[in-house]
Amino acid sequence: MDNPSDGVHHYDKDGNPLTRLQWTTLYGDYDYRVVADTKVGEQVVRTMWEGHEGPATVAAMYCTGIGTGKAWRNAAELYWPCTLAEAKAMHQDTVDRIREAKRP
């Protein structure tokens, strides 16, 4: 499995453990990594599988970002979903909040 001394562990979208080599292969597959991708006006909300957990500085099973052109930002500070269901729910919540903010 992974090197336990670095404290980082890798998992697939279903939470199954991966070796670092298996994770690297999946991480290189953009289609596998994309959980959801939604355009809202000029913004794009994209949720991606990252597949690793460990120390807080590197922990991220999933991440949702909001992009406008080349600039991206995290949809939520200090919160990263741990399961695929949580990631999909966060993505939809982010899309809904942006749509609500755009209503007159």
Image: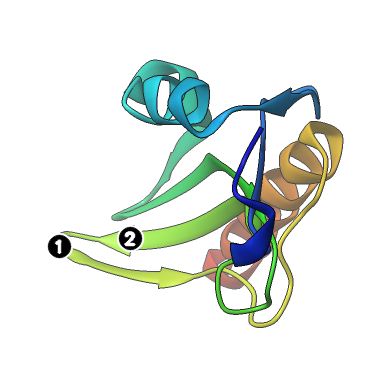
Q: Kindly identify the amino acid type of the residue bearing the numbered disc 1.
A: Lys
Q: Which one is nearer the viewer's eye here, 7 or 46?
A: 7
SS assignment at label 2: strand
**Residue 59, can we see it?**
no
x%, y% of residue 84?
A: 77, 33
Query: Dividing the image into 4 quarters, which one contains the C terminus?
Result: bottom right
User: What SS does tag 1 mark?
Assistant: loop
Residue 32 seen anywhere in this rendered image of the structure:
yes
Residue 42 appears left or right of 69: right
Which amino acid type is shown beneath numbered disc 2? Answer: Gly
Q: Is residue 49 above or below residue 42?
A: above
Q: Residue at x 61, y 41 (%)?
A: 2
Residue located at (57% from left, 79% from top): 57
Left or right, 75 with respect to 68, comes to: right
Residue 99 point in image, percent of width and height: 59, 57
Question: Contact (CB < 8 A) between labels 1 and 2?
Answer: yes
Q: Quadrant of residue 36?
A: top right
Figure check: 32 above or below 1: above
Residue at mark 1: 70
Q: Which mark is residue 67?
A: 2
> Foreground: 28 or 69?
28
Rendering coords of residue 50 (x, y %): 53, 44
Q: How many tags in the picture?
A: 2
